[in-house]
Every structure is written in C-alpha cells, then in structure tokens.
Image: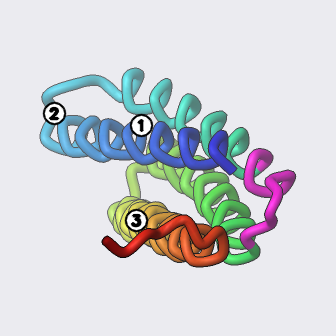
C-alpha cells in the first residue's frame, strides 16, 4: 500500500503542475507542447498508481475503483485535448476543462480516502496490540 500512497501523491503533484500549465496555455503564455508532454507523464503516473492499488495488500476497494476511474478520465482527457487542438472548438475545450476538474476532484478524494484508511488502520493496530500503558 505504501507504493500506492507515494504514487498517488506524485500523481497529485503532476496533476497540479498540469493544471497550472493548462492555465498558462489558455492565456497564451506557453505553447501546447509542455502541456501535452506533462499530460502523458501524468497518464503514465496514473497507470502506475492504478497498478499499485490493484495489487496492494490489504486491498482497499474504494482506491482500486478510484484509480481505474482516474485512468479512464485521463484517457478521455487526452482524446478531448487533441480534439480541441484539431478543430479549436470552444465547446470541446469546455468539456476538457470540466473533465480536468473531475480528475482533480477524484485525486483529492483518493488522498482523503487514504488518509482516513491510514488513520483507522493505525488506531486499530494500536488498540489490538495493547501496548498503551497508563501511568
């Protein structure tokens, strides 16, 4: 599970940078190349994160589902991004933006799910071991 946590945090950091690059691209500060390259790096990180959660023990089912959802949303994001580049449609660009917010929300949700699971599992371990002493 530790690998999944590290990869989820790296994916979140890459996503933050990708959102920043998307804003720079929108306002004409950068070319599309940096946003595209970072998008593919993010996609690779998301696939690695999904693989880590799918094989993790103990299995955390909500994170497994969420990791798959993030990869599917990123695949849709790539398709929408290239469609926007090809025809310049503002409607497709808007759906691309809304999908980016969904990816961001899913990643933030995953962070909170793992934080809660970590807290609950550490409390259960502390209570099960019985090593707490009252003095």
Q: Position of residue 29 (x, y in %)?
A: 14, 28
The structure residue drawn at horizontal position 59% and vertical position 72%, both measured from the top left corner, is: 130
Residues at marks 2 and 1, CA–CA distance in whole angstroms: 21 Å
Dot 1 corresponds to which residue? 14
- Which of pointers 2 and 1 indicates the residue nearer the eye? 1
Query: Which mark, by number, is residue 60?
Result: none
- Which of pointers 3 and 2 indicates the residue nearer the eye? 3
Dot 2 corresponds to which residue? 28
- Count residues near mark 1 (Cα–Cα under 10 Å), then give few for <14, some for 14-19, many for 20+: some
Region in magenta:
51-60
Q: Secondary structure at mark 3?
A: helix
In terms of image quadrants, where is residue 31?
top left
Q: Secondary structure at mark 1?
A: helix
Dot 3 corresponds to which residue? 108
Closest to the observer, 13 or 18: 13
Image quadrant occupied by the C terminus: bottom left
């Amino acid at each position: 599970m530790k690998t999944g946590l590290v990869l989820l945090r790296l994916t979140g950091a890459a996503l933050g940078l990708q959102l920043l690059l998307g804003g720079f691209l929108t306002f004409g500060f950068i070319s599309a190349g940096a946003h595209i390259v970072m998008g593919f790096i993010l996609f690779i990180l998301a696939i690695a994160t999904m693989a880590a959660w799918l094989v993790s023990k103990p299995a955390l089912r909500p994170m497994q589902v969420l990791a798959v959802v993030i990869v599917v949303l990123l695949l849709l994001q790539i398709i929408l991004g290239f469609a926007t580049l090809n025809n310049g449609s503002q409607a497709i660009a808007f759906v691309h933006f809304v999908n980016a917010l969904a990816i961001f929300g899913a990643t933030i949700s995953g962070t909170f799910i793992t934080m809660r699971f970590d807290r609950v599992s550490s409390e259960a371990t502390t209570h099960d071991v019985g090593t707490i002493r009252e003095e």
